[in-house]
Amino acid sequence: MGSLRARMAATWAASILAAATLLVCAGECKAKRPENLPGLSPNEVGAQGPEAGISPAEAAGLQGIWEVEHVGVNMADQPHWKWLPDDPQLVGREFIVSAEGIRFADFKEANCKPATWGRKTSAWKDLVDDLFLGPASKQTPARFRVKASGRDKVNVFEPCALTTPGRRGPGNNWVLGSWVVPVVADKLIMEFDADSVLYLSRRSGPPKASFDCGKAATPTEKAICGDASLAAWDRSIALAWKRLRERDGGVDSAVKAKHVEWLRTRNACGADVACLAATMREHTSYLVFAGR
């Protein structure tokens, strides 16, 4: 257990150094907001705080399907981890943004309809200093895969911001206070909760499973390769299984038996997308907790 976490922490630290190439869009590329936005409703403009008001261009730039690539947690507070570094339960999940709504797929507490946004400007250092609850740890922009000075100002967008202070809009049950920071093209950093920060990329290209979709033969395999969300869950299971195999002692017999049983259950779903999604999500969680 201890050695597994130690290896995961070391892997996470190494991945930070390898991936610290993102550049926060600071003052020189800051989006300009029009002075007057006639005809726009509060939902279209946003309304929370003195800097509230996301422009139509900014809102359009955030729209799309974003997929979690990495999960960062507070390495100084390991005993209270809710999520693991690059947790398979979160890697591959979808952050879906449209004019009609905002949601984090498979996490029903994170959504609102219609889409509303708050906006503020913050020094990067202030943003990361306030990120995690629990024991304090020295945070720097580089610690969060960002190449920037702590003094750099960044545009911070708050999903599902309140259009009326003190009141939630219809269907709004987002984790209030969470934020999104656009970085280089098609990359976002998002505070998911008080325990984790997510690194997201705009989804593009065909679905990618853990196996060669060109060789998909069964109805289940074809369904997985035909649906980006299912393909992402397939990769999550493969990641969780790989971590179990790499831990001290490998995979115990009970977990192996459960995994074989699950494969039969999954295949019994055939091409039923809802059935596959439910069983893959459940098995990912089982494998993750089996490794703790």
Image (cartoon, rainbow, N blue to C red):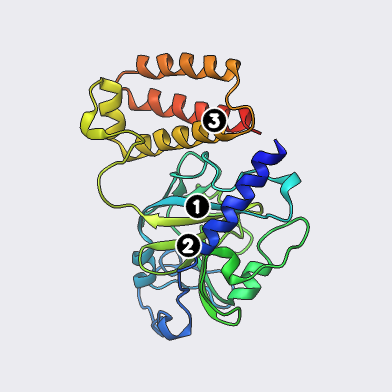
Q: Label 1 neighbourhood size at 10 Å, few (<14), some (14-19), many (20+)?
A: many
Circle 3 Cα neighbour tier, 10 Å, few/some/many (<14 / 14–19 / ≥20): some
- Coordinates of residue 87 in the picture (x, y in percent): 55, 43
Q: Nearer the viewer, residue 141 or 274?
A: 141
Tell me the residue that label 3 is attached to.
245
Q: Are the residues at dot 1 and dot 2 in contact (C-beta closer than 8 Å)?
A: yes
Which numbered marker is on residue 19?
2
Q: Which mark is residue 177?
A: none
**CA separation in Å, label 1 and label 2:** 10 Å
Residue 163 in view: no
In this figure, which residue is indicated by the disc labeled 1?
A: 70
Q: How crowded is the residue under tag 2: few (<14 C-alpha within 10 Å), some, or many (20+)? A: few
Q: Nearer the viewer, mark 3 or mark 2?
A: 3
Residue shown at 73% from the left, 63% from the top: 137
Residue type at mark 2 is: Ala
Between 54 and 292, the residue placed more toward the observer is 292
- CB within 8 Å, label 3 to label 1: no
**Residue in the foreground of this view, choosing between 11 and 232:** 11
Q: Which residue: 72% across, 48% down?
A: 78
Q: Which quadrant holds residue 29? A: bottom left
